[in-house]
Amino acid sequence: MSYILAHDLGTSGNKATLFSDQGELVAYCTVSYPTRYFNRVWAEQNPNDWWNAVCESTQQLITQSKIDSSQIIVVAISGQMMGSTCIDRQGNPLRPSIIYCDQRSEKETSDILSKISMEEAYKIIGHRVAAVYSLPKLLWIKNNEPEIFKKTFKTVCAKDYINFRLTNIIATDYSDASGTNAFDLSTKTWSRTILRAADIDESFFPDIFPSTHILGEITHEAAKATGLKVGTLVSCGGGDGACATVGVGSVRPGITYHYIGSSGWVGLTTEKPIFDSKMRTMTWAHCLPEYYHPSGSMQTAGTAYNWLKEQICTAESVTAKNRNENVYQLMNEILLQSPPGANGLLFLPYLLGERSPRWNPNARGAFIGLTLASRRCDLIRSVMEGITYNFSMIADIFREHVSIDTMTVIGGGAKGRVWLQMMADIFDAKIQRPNFLEEATSMGAAIVGGVGAGIFKDFNVIEQFLHTEEIFEPNPENQKVYQKIRPLFDKAYYSLVELFDDLHDI
């Protein structure tokens, strides 16, 4: 039997998974690393932490599974997208990586848009020009850290840096390239028009290949660090969103899904990009080169839920620890004491600005409707409802182009039945929970690697891996409540936009 090793470089850590050529999940482990959040909207990680996590998790999997590493045919990486990791000619990181949720480059975004309209750029790249993307971040480095920029050979994404450490080859794939703000969706090349507007030379960006492209082989140095065999194949891999799309089974048009992790999105597969008239959503290149992956992403989805746990549900955290229980399960039990609508309490989940559908880096979180009668259960429910309202707005944008009556949900947020039922009620769709939740992204990467290495014939092999375990139907009574409240959620945001801008200057 042969195996595929997949790594998923996320926000909080690297998840390593080992899959057999029969679609069996053999072993998995996670090694965490820190993120430094500062200056309100800045976020950075150390690329060497990614590498150390990949090395440690690889060694753990080989030991845990008790297989011979020579049985691992190919390594495939999925990673957080939209960052800027500046490396020199030897591939050494020159500074911490500015990751996807960092929004420091507002001025640079404005500079680019002074030379090209948002509408023109959106039609080229399938995205707004915005501070969350790689190109404005690189321009920020050019403007604010000229000595670093002078030494920069390439800017790469997270998985591309790991691929370099494994193979000594600097490259990226179409999906990650489409998260830079510099990629032409129609030609699948770096856009000279956008780069000219940014005054950034194309040479700063790596060569681009399909996700399934076999980039190279494990070097002697990488073998020593990871425990893998010299010569093991390394696939080009893909961005986390694109790999999750494969891992959830959206490998042909008509399959919509919802990922809810630290960040989150609603995504689908199409034959052509979806260009929203208000530019609220974006389109990425798919891991399957003939398809596209439209999506709408939130900055703080599961992160807002975690903030609730850390800052408001401290008593529940202590109780869960003392009982050796899951704190989120305890929070769900308390939530059920509050009715749908949280007794009139709304929560705006914009704790780090927002992408879809707001595209407002100044957006803030807020509880609206607090009274002396508000209880802890209302706070918990309102946070989960607020996150779900925002995602439902994204889904409705796509409903202007495609039909959505069923949605598969993956990620850590898909573990709780309470939240899944809430999604069914607010989304007005059947919610499917598959057998793999947090492994979907790395599983997608494994399939990408397996197809690239010739282990699998095509992407339809996902049917060997995936099946639905539970379906949640919308509750008509709950839907009536949410249909009244959701417009108020939208109204609450727009009522505070001017205030958010004023707070940004303080």
Image (cartoon, rainbow, N blue to C red):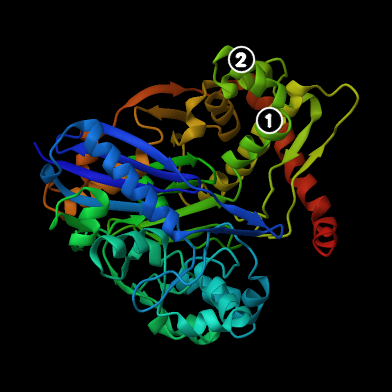
**Which is more foreground, mark 2 or mark 1?**
2
Q: Return the residue found at the far top.
A: 323
- Residue 296 visible somewhere in the drawing: yes
Q: Residues within 10 Å of mark 2 (few under 14, many from 20)?
A: few
The residue at the point 56 percent across, 35 percent down is 427
Q: Return the residue found at the far right.
A: 372
The location of residue 44, given as percent across then percent down, is 56, 59
Q: Nearer the viewer, residue 427 or 10?
A: 10
Q: Quadrant of residue 393?
A: top right
The location of residue 139, given as percent across then percent down, is 56, 78
**Under tag 2, what secondary structure?**
helix
Q: Image check: 428 left or right of 221?
A: right
Q: Nearer the viewer, residue 347 or 42?
A: 42
Q: Amino acid at mark 2?
A: Asn
Residue 482: assigned label: 1
Which residue is labeled 2 in the image?
322
Q: Residues within 10 Å of mark 1 (few under 14, many from 20)?
A: many
- Count of number-bearing discs: 2
The residue at the point 54 percent across, 44 percent down is 395
- Verify CB contact (< 8 Å) between mark 2 and mark 1: no
Q: Quadrant of residue 321?
A: top right
